[in-house]
Amino acid sequence: MTTDGRFLHAAHWGTFYAVVESGRFVRAEPFEGDPTPSPILSNMPETVQGPARVRHPMVRQDWLERRGASRATRGTGPFVRVTWDQALDLVAGELGRVRAEHGDAAVYSGSYGWSSAGRFHHAKSQLQRFMNLSGGSTVSIQNYSYAAAITLLPHVVGTLAPVAGPMSSWDGIAAHTELFVGFGGLALKNAQVEPGGIGHHTTETWVRRCKANGTAFVNIGPSRADMPAWLDADWVPLRPNTDTALILALCHSLLAEDLHDRGFLDRCCAGFERFAAYLRGETDGTPKCPEWASPITGVAPGTIRALARRMAGARTMINLAWGLQRADHGEQPYWAAVALAAMLGQIGLPGGGFGFGYAAMGGNGEKRPKGGLPTHAQGINPVDSWIPLARIADMLLQPGQSYDYDGKTRIYPDIRLVYWCGGNPFHHHQDLNRLVRAFRQPETVVVNEGFWTATARHADIVLPATTTLERNDIAASRQDDFLIAMRQAIEPVGEARSDFEIFTGLAERTGIAQAFTEGRDEMAWLRHLYERARGRGSNELPDFDRFWADGHARLPVDDAPFVLFADFRADPAGRPLKTPSGRIELYSERVAGFGYEDCPGHPAWIPPAEWAGSPRAATFPLHLLSPQPAGRLHSQMDGGGASRRSKIQGREPVRLSPVDAGARGLVDGDIVRIWNDRGQVLAGVIVTDDLIPGVVQLATGAWYDPKEPFGLDLRGNANVLSLDKGTSRLGQAPSAQSCLVEVERWTGAVPDLGPDVPEEAVQAA
């Protein structure tokens, strides 16, 4: 039993003390020494104990009565409260039936891993461990954050380090970078979070140090607010989805004015002449000069040339936001940026080169600590069945259909049972009306969930899962040197159980309990994982008992700045990259050999399916961007105070320029309908001169709340509107940022929001 007090804990948005009074979590107090604690922490008490919690095992009544015949009504209808034994028996029985009748690949185990910063109660690890031990399942690869980069970068630079870390560290940037060029800005709000938790938020501190040391900043994109005003950054307004065209024109300018580093290109790169021929227009008759790029990007030719000269004359760090590759042909801006950095010749030099996602997460740009982390082993999946994560709707809607991915042709499996744990695809995925149809295809959907998210509402069996405050764990991140003892602060809400307890119950019913638990309970597992990490090079850490008593420990970190590709630059032959040539591939024979017209063998401008220059703009003239929110993480904590205070009449705010607002007769506070041929949502207006005309911003993460199935979304979920299309046949990544819409004032009565909890769940509580 927990008692009142102050409990050290950690979440994705920071380390904190959970203050508990009379058995209730009343407030979160930031960890000592955190220079910029996240305001998202204030959301936690009212959310963790709020009305949207799943408090009991629930089964959809239609499924109980009709099983597979109930698919057409999934997402509607009442739930029935059952006991834990009944619920686990139903799940184990369904898993056994589906595997016996259709094979292990007919089970899809989905998770996105953001339900806890803890390494033991990591939902994906618990789910995959159970599935792998019990026969295997179809799984996903990649992520929604930077999936196009995951597939592209191994072909170009042989590593994911430029996007997943370790990137060139902030201390080296602060000491050496003269010019920081941010395509998509440098949105510090995104640096609040880190998957394994974070001890101290330092990104803003480092950026301020860069400015104090004389680093100049350039913000390239449609939003001036994507860099903080105190940076006094030069803003280059740019049409969304045209970064590739601008980067190619910068490359052309360097080439035309002989400002490129020929020595570096010859020594460290492969395929430059093929790429240069494309820049000159020798392959398609169109030189990629500033005059060509200007009508595409909206940036004047003189501005492009001046920026190219400025970058060539300074120690320049090039940064691209993750969001730029979450667009149609999202591989291209990243590949083009590598080419631009290579032409400048500063890759591998202190303060120079490139990185993807500085400030995208709190740990990006931090040096990686030495030693191992206390991660939980998932085992090996005995089934060779997987999909790129963003193709889940395609898989469910098109079983048996072939698709291309990274040089291979694969077949979508026929999924009969979906088991989701620790994530909300009705936040992450695009074109939610299509996803609703997709979720109606399997015979059974099972969800471990702590809240009545849209995913829980579209399940047949909902198993109530604890939040991190209701269990013990260890927070640890690859890019943060803190290990945090996450102490249980409150008793489980209702009948909630941890994922470990849930899967232990299922393992007992499927005959794998000993293999799954190895005879350990929660605290025994924490001790085992911690001590195993100590044995993998983390010997500087205290033993587990000392760590748990102290509440935290720190891993050692090198004092010297880390410079990405420094070893390769110093000795390209002796320290080659893991590419076919061993060098940076500005032209890839391997990618070219795939024969993909939507991803050729070098960086190229390929017009997106939806952008200001497409025919659809005549009907839907506004480009919708859906950035991460400032007051919550994804859709988590949408009901908390920091998130609610940002809303207008309970709706997500939509930002648009005075030009676009004036043309539609809109003012601050108006409720508007945003729509296209995929769906429609309500939102509240904020007029701002920080956006260029023709662009609107609607942050992701408002809970999906349709007035009726496939109808008007009442809270402003951006993914009702976004495009569900693979970036290319190479990456098959999400294309959410390629989306055109129209906006108009809502003239009728503003509908009430839907309830946070299904009516039957309220009665069951």
Image (cartoon, grey):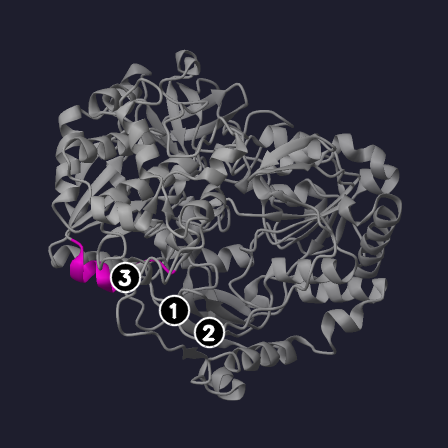
Q: Amino acid at mark 2?
A: Ile
Image position of 679 (left or right of 313): right
Is residue 175 one of those drawn in magenta?
A: yes
Q: Which structural element holds mark 3? A: helix
Q: Which structural element holds mark 2? A: strand
Q: Residue 592: horizontal and vertical position, in percent?
A: 47, 34
- What residue sits 76% from the left and 30% below the top? 72
Is residue 649 one of those drawn in magenta?
A: no
Q: Please say if 97 is above or below 598.
A: below
Q: Quadrant of the N terminus?
A: bottom right
Total numbered badges shown on the rendered structure: 3
- What residue sits 70% from the left and 57% below the top? 381
Q: Residue 114: horizontal and vertical position, in percent?
A: 53, 55
* Contact, mark 1 vs mark 2 (Cβ under 8 Å): yes
The quarter holding residue 171 reads: bottom left
Residue tagged 3: 570
- What residue sits 60% from the left and 37% below the top? 391
Chain part drawn in magenta: 166-177
Residue tagged 1: 199
Q: Earlier in the sequence, mark 1 or mark 2?
A: 1
The quarter holding residue 558 reads: bottom left
Residue 484's label in the rendered image is: 2
